[in-house]
Amino acid sequence: MSFCPESKEETRITRRSLLQWAVAAPAALALSRVVSDLPLAQAAPAGPFKLPPLPYAYGSLAPTISEMTMRIHHDKHHQAYVDKLNAAVSATPSLAGKSPQTLIQNLNAVPESVRTAVRNNGGGHVNHTMFWEIMSPKGGGAPTGDIAAAIRTNFGSFDNFKKKFNEAGEKRFGSGWVWLVSDKGQMKIISTPNQDNPLMMGMFPIMGNDVWEHAYYLTYQNKRAAYLKAWWNVVNWDAINSRLNYFSKMS
């Protein structure tokens, strides 16, 4: 077999390639070290609490609430509350077997080391579980049944109730919720900061609207009042009646 020495062109290309490799290799090595130092993705903390599925399709509340908003709000924000609540409870054996409602209703009994985590994430889990349930693609319109009677008795009319409810939601500074609650059997409209729930104050939450910006910003931007006004188009009065009847038995 004859041996053919490389041509000058082949020599020039080979040397150029070697030079390019010599320049690139240190950078590639450094990059590989950075990548190898990155933490591996962690699985969601195991625990007793699960993200409940939506009782309707993501896009079925549109145009009041967009599909993208629902996907981010439910799959990302609510899931994060569930994961962090599971982490707090899993690290605290004394909390085993307690429902999220019981935990936030008795925060003073929660060890101080995880109390803030339980307050924020337990509240977030309870609040959002209710929120998905009291909306429906077939919702809206005037209330019926016991909730309609309670609204008339305590607020004079549905229009007056909506006005006061929306005003309380608009006035909530920053992030929070606006609620219709039963306080020792009396109906009141209140608002709470962050993910606080009326159960933390000894009140029963009949219905509530989320006024965190992530609940409305994709569609309404900074126009919280427009969101609050539109939200009545998807309110599920049957579910709210069920909550009213449940808490009435506990009052």
Image (spheres, rainbow, N blue to C red):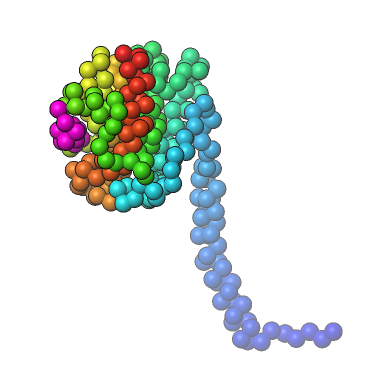
- The quadrant in which the C terminus is found is top left
From the viewer's perspective, tell me whether residue 21 is left or right of residue 82.
Answer: right
Tell me residue 205's x, y (percent).
30, 24
Tell me where residue 125 sits by quadrant: top left
Horizontal and vertical percent for residue 182?
26, 20
Query: Residue at (45%, 20%) from the top-left corner?
Result: 99
Percent coordinates x, y for residue 141 in the rendering: 27, 40
Q: Residue at x 50, y 18 (%)?
A: 97
* Magenta-tinted stretch: 156-169
Along the viewing direction, whichever of 98 and 34 lies nearer the viewer: 98
The majority secondary structure of the magenta stretch comes to helix
The answer to whether 98 is drawn above or below residue 8 in the figure is above
Residue in the foreground of this view, choosing between 69 and 162: 162
225 to 202, vertically: above or below: below
Residue 151 or 110: which is nearer the viewer? 151
> In which quadrant of the rendered image does the N terminus lie?
bottom right
Q: Nearer the viewer, residue 30 or 188?
A: 188
Q: Is residue 134 visible?
A: yes
Residue 165 lies in magenta, yes or no?
Answer: yes
Residue 173 visible? The answer is no
Q: Was residue 124 drawn as part of the magenta stretch in this picture?
A: no
